[in-house]
Image (cartoon, rainbow, N blue to C red):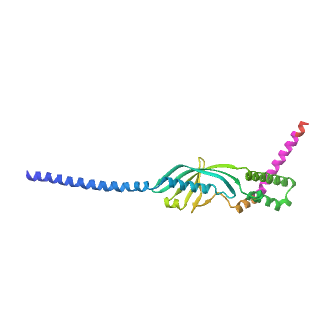
């Protein structure tokens, strides 16, 4: 009987020992789990918001030859995961084109260059179409140089961690209901929009495509002119 009682008492001792050990392990595990929460709490969301807004505005207002008159940014969504950053930012800006001369605009420059080189090979009708289209483009550029234009855009910005955000290193996505694509980067606070061509690329594109455009429009112009003549004659 003593052996039996001793055995039971032994199990009690073992049970108490195991219980104490489990409490210690559980406590250590709980401390380990809480550590990231403490780290996250140290991230100042106000600072992060300021960083993503700065990056979004730098990216949004970096269109070549746009003269920004006013700009603003609003953080619509902010997620900080293991110090990594994801943010949805809405931007608004007002601007005018910053050219001194309308013919400094790359696409207009390319069209004008094409006409100057090819005019001797064109028919009278084709020259008329080319000159009319260039004048329409010139008037548009002049208007954009004088009349402020408002625009808005939504971007998603990501940074690997808080320090990268502080250094101005972000990946930028165009973020709308239609388009959710990588739009470029901000590296060391320098923007790179992958959709914006250089002036030389834009000029060359206009030069290379304007001839086909003129040929396509020539019969359309002729038809419109004939229709106008017929309507005028019918009034008589």
Residue 187 position in % (x across, y down): 57, 62
Name the magenta segment's main secondary structure.
helix
Q: Quadrant of residue 82?
A: bottom left
Q: Is residue 222 magenta?
A: yes
Which residue extends farthest right? 236
Which residue extends farthest top? 235
Q: Which residues are magenta?
A: 209-231
Q: Is 143 left or right of 40, judged from the image as shown?
A: right
Q: Quadrant of residue 213?
A: bottom right
Q: Is 232 left or right of 139, judged from the image as shown?
A: right
Residues 134 and 24: in front is 24
Q: Can residue 70 be seen in the rendering of this structure?
A: yes
Q: How many marks?
A: 0
Residues 162 and 26: in front is 162
Residues 194 and 187: in front is 187
Q: Is residue 202 magenta?
A: no
Quadrant in which the C terminus is drawn: top right
Q: Identify the residue at image location x=74%, y=53%.
A: 145
Residue 226 position in % (x across, y down): 86, 44
Residue 96 position in % (x across, y down): 70, 53
Residue 124 position in % (x across, y down): 87, 54
């Amino acid at each position: 009987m003593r052996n039996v009682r001793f055995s039971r008492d032994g199990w009690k001792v073992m049970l108490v020992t195991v219980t104490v050990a489990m409490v210690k392990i559980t406590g250590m595990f709980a401390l380990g789990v809480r550590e990231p929460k403490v780290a996250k709490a140290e991230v100042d969301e106000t600072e992060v918001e300021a960083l993503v807004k700065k990056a979004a505005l730098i990216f949004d207002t970096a269109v070549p030859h746009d003269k920004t008159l006013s700009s603003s940014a609003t953080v619509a969504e902010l997620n900080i995961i293991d110090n990594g950053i994801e943010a949805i930012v809405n931007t608004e800006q007002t601007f005018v084109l910053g050219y001194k001369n309308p013919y400094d605009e790359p696409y207009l420059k390319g069209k004008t260059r094409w006409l100057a080189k090819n005019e001797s090979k064109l028919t009278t009708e084709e020259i008329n179409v080319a000159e009319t289209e260039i004048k329409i483009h010139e008037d548009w550029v002049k208007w954009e140089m004088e009349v402020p234009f408002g625009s808005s855009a939504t971007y998603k910005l990501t940074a690997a961690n808080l320090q990268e955000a502080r250094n101005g290193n972000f990946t930028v996505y165009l973020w709308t209901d239609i388009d959710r694509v990588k739009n470029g980067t901000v590296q060391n606070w320098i923007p790179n929009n992958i959709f914006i061509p250089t002036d030389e690329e834009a000029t060359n594109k206009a030069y290379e495509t304007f001839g086909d455009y003129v040929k396509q429009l020539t019969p359309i112009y002729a038809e419109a002119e004939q229709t106008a003549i017929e309507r005028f004659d019918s009034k008589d």
